[in-house]
Image (spheres, rainbow, N blue to C red):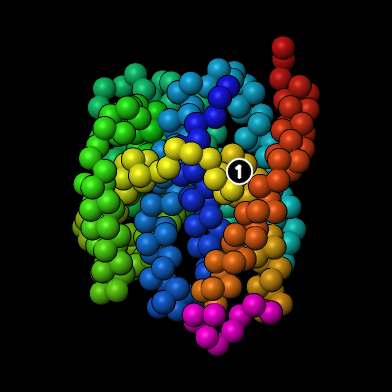
Amino acid sequence: MKRNVKLDNLKAFLIFIVVLGHVFEFMYGPSELYGFIRSIIYSFHMPAFIFLSGYFSKNSKTHLSKITVSYLSTYLIFNIVFSLTPWSIAPTLDLLRPQIISWYLLCLLFWRVSVTALSKIKFIVPLSILFTLYIGCIEPADRFLSISRAICFLPFFLAGYFCSMKKINNINLGLSWLLLAACLFLTGAANYFKLLPVKMYEYIQCYHSTDVGNLNGIQMRLFMIIISFVIIICLIRLSPTRRYWFTVFGENSLMIYLIHIFPIEILNSYGILNFDNDCLNIAISVILSIALCLVLSRPIITTAYNYFNRFLVRIFTVS
């Protein structure tokens, strides 16, 4: 199937800022400057990725059993491997609580398996937004099976599934730039004036765990959802249609996503790239993020993963 270069370019940008956001988070901590940058990145990077995942899933011919084996096996492998590292967020191996990045695989499995049925429900996108606002009021819904994120990011997946790229590409170019700038400004202002905690953008905790009341949390989350949708539409409209040297990042974004956290954590454990100068740290973060994307986007890595994945699918599915 012929690749969509425009969307590959967008995925390339998104995976780069995913890596960049994790460099800031794990290597430089929650200081105000890095928190400000992360708030802008986190306001749209995963919603946009999930939107594109929904868009591509509607034309997928892969059987549900193969989808299940593919995502579940990858989730289990990376969750187990990360649990055995010194950077595990859990004291023991817990396959029901995703480690760091593996939550996306578990959620993607849920969305892909359920989207056909969900798409037959009238008004499912606004209904899913209501569930997103509601689940923030429920304290037990956190990391367990990534329930919170599975619900909170579902509207973006469904919106991508129903999306018409033709309509987006007809939006005025100047208006797209204006709306994008306005949304990024509002996001930055919300963080600068401490109106919206960075942790809110992770969609992993209930409102009270983020030190906000339910009513304020609902208002914040609705603001985040609206901003994310506008930014996503603008980025799709503004993405270039020709191939560049970085387009390969988008073509092999899954491998970058799955592996990049390991070298970041290794570098963080030694502290060799952490300096007292913020400008130097930011420059190093950008260079490191590009370098990781360049290395991990090599086609041989994706080819090896696909071969191993097909091997598992053959073993655990019935023809």
- Looking at the image, residue 131 sits to the left or right of residue 98; the answer is left
Q: Amino acid at mark 1?
A: Val
In this orientation, which residue lies closer to the viewer: 124 or 96? 124
Depth check: 278 or 229 in front? 278
Tell me if 143 is positioned left or right of 168 in this view: right
Please state the horizontal and vertical placement of residue 304, each as a whole percent of the image: 77, 37
Q: Main secondary structure of the magenta part?
A: loop
Q: Quadrant of residue 41?
A: bottom left
Q: Residue at x 58, y 56 (%)?
A: 100
Q: Where is the C terminus found, in terms of image quarters?
A: top right
Check if residue 65 falls in the magenta segment.
no
Kindly identify the residue that appears in the image at 30 percent across and 67 percent down: 188
Query: Does 286 appear above or below 43?
Result: below
Instruction: Name the residue located 25 percent from the left edge and 27 percent from the top edge.
Output: 123
CA neighbours of label 1 inside 10 A, class few (<14), some (14 to 19), many (20+): many
Residue bearing the label numbered 1: 248
Q: Nearer the viewer, residue 122 or 35?
A: 35
The residue segment tinted magenta is: 272-280
Rendered location of residue 219, percent (x, y)? 22, 56
Residue 293 place in picture, x, y as percent: 62, 54
Whether residue 119 is visible here, answered yes or no, is: yes
Farthest residue toward the bottom? Answer: 276
Residue drawn at (65%, 60%) of the image: 291
In the rendered image, the vertical position of residue 204 relative to residue 175, given as above or below: below
Q: Is 311 displayed left or right of 222 in the figure?
A: right
Dot 1 falls on a residue whose secondary structure is: helix
